[in-house]
Structure formats: C-alpha cells, structure tokens
Image (cartoon, helix red, strand yellow):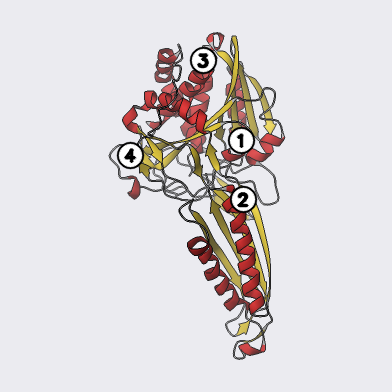
C-alpha cells in the first residue's frame, strides 16, 4: 500500500439493493475451520513479522509460503516476478476460477513497536542500510491467505472450481532500475492457466477498528504518477540576479502554478485530485544563483480522463512559466499505478457476503483514498474487489493511532480470523453462486 494517507469510514450504507448472493453449503464448516486454525495463523503472522524483507528480495518469505502450500498438496509455482509464489487448488467439481492475492514485501522502516516478535532486520535500500518492518501490514495478509489455503485444502473435494493463491512481491514498488510487483506478475502469466473469473484482496487498516470492513463500488484508491521537472536557468552571482536567470524563483512559481490546476482548472465536483511537490533541489552556495533546479512529486487522480487532462495542464504550466522568464523546463511524468476500481457488479454481488461475515452494522462505504495500490493492475484484466479491514482494538480512536507505514503501526491480531473468514467466504460464495 502507498504512503501514509487517511481513510474516513462513512456510516451510510449503499442504497442499491444487491443481487442475491448464494451462501455456500460450506459456510458453517468454514467458520469452524477458521476457529481451529487461528493459533496457526497467528504464529505465521508473528514469524513473518519478525523476518520482513524488502521488495524483490523476499526469499525467506517466499520459501516459507511455498513450503506450506506444497505441504497442503497445491500446485505451486515459484520465482514469479523474482520471488512471487502462486498456488493452485483445484476443487473436486467443475466451476469458475477465483484468485486471492497477498503482498510479500516489507518497508525500509525501523520498527518501534514493543512486542516480542518485533523486527530487528536490516537491509540495503538505495545504497543505504535501513531497518525493515512490515509497517504496512502485509505480514497479516500472508498469514490470512495461508489460513485460507489450509482451510480449503481440507475440503477441496467438495469445492466447485479452482482457487489461485497469489503471493506477490514488491507491492510497495520494486527497487530502482528493476521491474516487479503486479505488472511483472501479469507479464509472467499469473492471470493465465487458468484465468480467474474474479479476484479478491484486502488490507488491514489503521483508520478502522477490528470487526469493521469498508468497501466502495468503482474507484476506491487513486492512480499515482511520479513527475520530475528540471528547470534550467543561467548561473550568476547572488548579488547580481539580473545577470542570469534564476531557476529557484521560477521553480517556486511552478509549484504555486501547479496548485491552481487542482483548485481552479479541473472540475472538483467530478473527482478529487492532488498534485504534491515532495522534493525541490538546487544550488550549492548561499550567494550563487544556480544553473538548474529539480522538482519531484506525485499526482493522484480517480478518473482516467482527468488524469490525462492534468498531465497536459502540468506540461503547459511548467513550460509557460519557464519560458516567461527566459528559462527552459523539461517535464517527465512516470505512470506508477492506475486507479484501484472495484467492479460494480462484483461488489454488489458480494456485499451480502461481507455483511454476513462482519454483521451489517460493521460494513461501511469507504471514502475515496488518495493512496495507491498495485492491485489496480489486476483489476484492469479481471473483475476485482479490494477491501479494508480495521486493525485497531475496538474502542480506540482511529484518528489517534499510528498509521500504516509508521514505525509504531501495530495490528490487533483479532483481525486475523476476520480476514481469513472474509476471504474464504468471498471465494466459496462466488464459486458456488457462479
């Protein structure tokens, strides 16, 4: 999951009447199996949490998962997108194909949570030694998905269709200069042989309490693009600025000018958008106007057409401001993630499952989240549904608790059985109802 961002849970339930969802005949057995497996799921989570690994380097994690899946009798493929693992469980009856996805990677964060299984791991990130922590909660997702795999392995003869268990590396982004994550998983065939008819994923979330599930039909998380702007002026003495072209002043004007794009140029009633400059670098001495400055930042949008329009507006703004001062500007926009958009029909169909698992009062519509998620790439290929599970203890104000990606982010492990139940019931209800 990307960066730290806020999610507000809306208590208003969907006014649409969802289509009737078939409750699988395995429902009661699934719940009994989850209760039986809970200690094992907790143990997996703690072991993975204590030994996090960065994207495209999740070798220990991948081996642990592959060994567990093989022991359950699944068809296992390893080395997908460097360290990804895919397990295939074929039911005893013909039917559709469902894919369930978890991430593998941790973050370059030094853990500050006081638990016996806290991470003490170190790694090299961008040439620097860093602490490594599952600060986003992917350890929980892996443990949940392993629990679902063991659960269904014990009843596969009565299962119609096939379940693909997708354990994906580098969701937080691959290292500089490397490919990885969902795009490389897709390129290397994760959605083929067999192709899923639907795909589900969930994420533990600091802005909700254990027991709560939030969802949204259509766009739920933003597209993310990275931009790099290089403004070239002409160096001169700081006491004689008229003798050159000051790229720092021009860069400041560019920062302000880009903010008018989101506040004054695009229709804010259609969808929100964000343009943030996160890096402004230039100059080496207090009394020298430098030759150039570099600005880097991010663009967040929820609509493809608006995304393309904002790209054009940024280009026009940057180049026009630079030209007006006699400078030149080079703009590079790097698409990172498309919009995470839940398939409306799939969302409507599975809503009764969510309400049965968590209780109707605990299922709420999420507001739009300006963070990004590479599950979006799968959703461009197959119908997908992405959910949030609250991870704070009941009664804790989510606005005061450490957020995902914080070194203090802690998960109430009571979310683990709910996550296993949610994924298992979504898969079973879909397979039996297709």
Give the number of the disc on residue 118.
Answer: none
Q: Which residue is mark 2?
A: 124
Tell me which residue sits at (39%, 24%) in the image: 357
Residue 284: x %, y % from top left? 62, 77
Q: Residue furthest left?
A: 395
Give the number of the disc on residue 11.
Answer: 4
SS label for mark 2: strand
Label 2 with label 1: CB-CB less than 8 Å: no
* Mark 4 to mark 2 CA distance (whole Å): 43 Å
The image shows residue 127, relative to residue 217, as above or below, that is below
* Mark 4 to mark 1 CA distance (whole Å): 29 Å
Labels 2, 3: front one: 3
* Mark 3 to mark 1 CA distance (whole Å): 23 Å
Q: Which residue is mark 3?
A: 432
Earlier in the chain: of badge 2 and badge 1, it is 2
Q: Which residue is mark 1?
A: 378
Can residue 318 be spotted in the picture? yes
Residue 26: x %, y % from top left? 45, 12
SS label for mark 4: loop
Labels 2, 1: front one: 1
Labels 4, 1: front one: 4
Q: Quadrant of the C terminus?
A: top right
Residue 113: x %, y % from top left? 41, 45
Q: Residues within 10 Å of mark 1 (few under 14, many from 20)?
A: many
Earlier in the chain: of badge 3 and badge 4, it is 4
Left or right: 293 as drawn, with respect to 349: right
């Amino acid at each position: 999951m990307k960066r730290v961002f806020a999610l507000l849970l809306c208590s208003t339930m969907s006014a649409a009447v969802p289509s009737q969802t078939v409750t699988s005949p395995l429902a009661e057995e699934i719940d009994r199996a989850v209760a039986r497996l809970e200690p094992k799921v907790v143990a997996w989570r703690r072991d993975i949490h204590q030994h996090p690994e960065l994207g495209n380097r999740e070798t220990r994690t991948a081996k642990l998962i592959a060994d567990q899946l093989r022991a359950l009798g699944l068809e296992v493929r390893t080395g997908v997108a460097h360290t990804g693992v895919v397990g295939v469980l074929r039911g005893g009856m013909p039917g559709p194909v469902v894919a369930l996805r978890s991430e593998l990677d941790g973050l370059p964060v030094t853990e500050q949570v006081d638990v016996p299984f806290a991470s003490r791991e170190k790694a090299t990130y961008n040439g620097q030694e860093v602490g490594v922590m599952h600060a986003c909660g992917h350890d929980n997702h892996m443990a949940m998905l392993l629990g679902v795999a063991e659960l269904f392995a014990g009843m596969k003869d009565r299962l119609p269709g096939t379940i693909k268990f997708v354990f994906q590396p580098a969701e937080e982004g691959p290292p500089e200069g490397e490919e990885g994550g969902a795009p490389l998983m897709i390129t290397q065939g994760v959605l083929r042989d067999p192709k899923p008819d639907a795909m589900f994923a969930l994420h533990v979330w600091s802005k909700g309490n254990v027991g709560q599930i939030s969802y949204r039909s259509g766009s739920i998380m933003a597209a993310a693009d990275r931009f790099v702007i290089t403004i070239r002026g002409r160096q001169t003495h700081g006491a004689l600025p008229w003798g050159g072209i000051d790229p720092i002043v021009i860069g400041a004007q560019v920062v302000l000018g880009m903010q008018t794009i989101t506040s004054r140029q695009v229709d804010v009633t259609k969808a929100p958008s964000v343009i943030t400059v996160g890096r402004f670098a230039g100059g080496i001495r207090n009394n020298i106007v430098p030759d150039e400055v570099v600005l880097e930042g991010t663009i967040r949008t929820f609509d493809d057409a608006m995304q393309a329009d904002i790209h054009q507006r940024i280009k026009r703004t940057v180049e026009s401001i630079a030209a007006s001062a006699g400078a030149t500007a080079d703009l590079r926009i790097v698409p990172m993630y498309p919009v995470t958009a839940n398939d409306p029909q799939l969302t409507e169909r599975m809503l009764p499952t969510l309400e049965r698992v968590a209780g109707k009062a605990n299922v709420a519509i999420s507001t739009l989240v300006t963070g990004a998620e590479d599950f979006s790439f799968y959703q461009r290929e197959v119908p997908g549904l992405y959910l949030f599970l609250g991870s704070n203890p009941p009664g804790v104000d989510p606005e005061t608790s450490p957020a995902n990606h914080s070194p203090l982010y802690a998960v109430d492990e009571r979310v683990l059985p709910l996550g296993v139940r949610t994924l298992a019931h979504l898969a079973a209800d879909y397979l039996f109802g297709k």
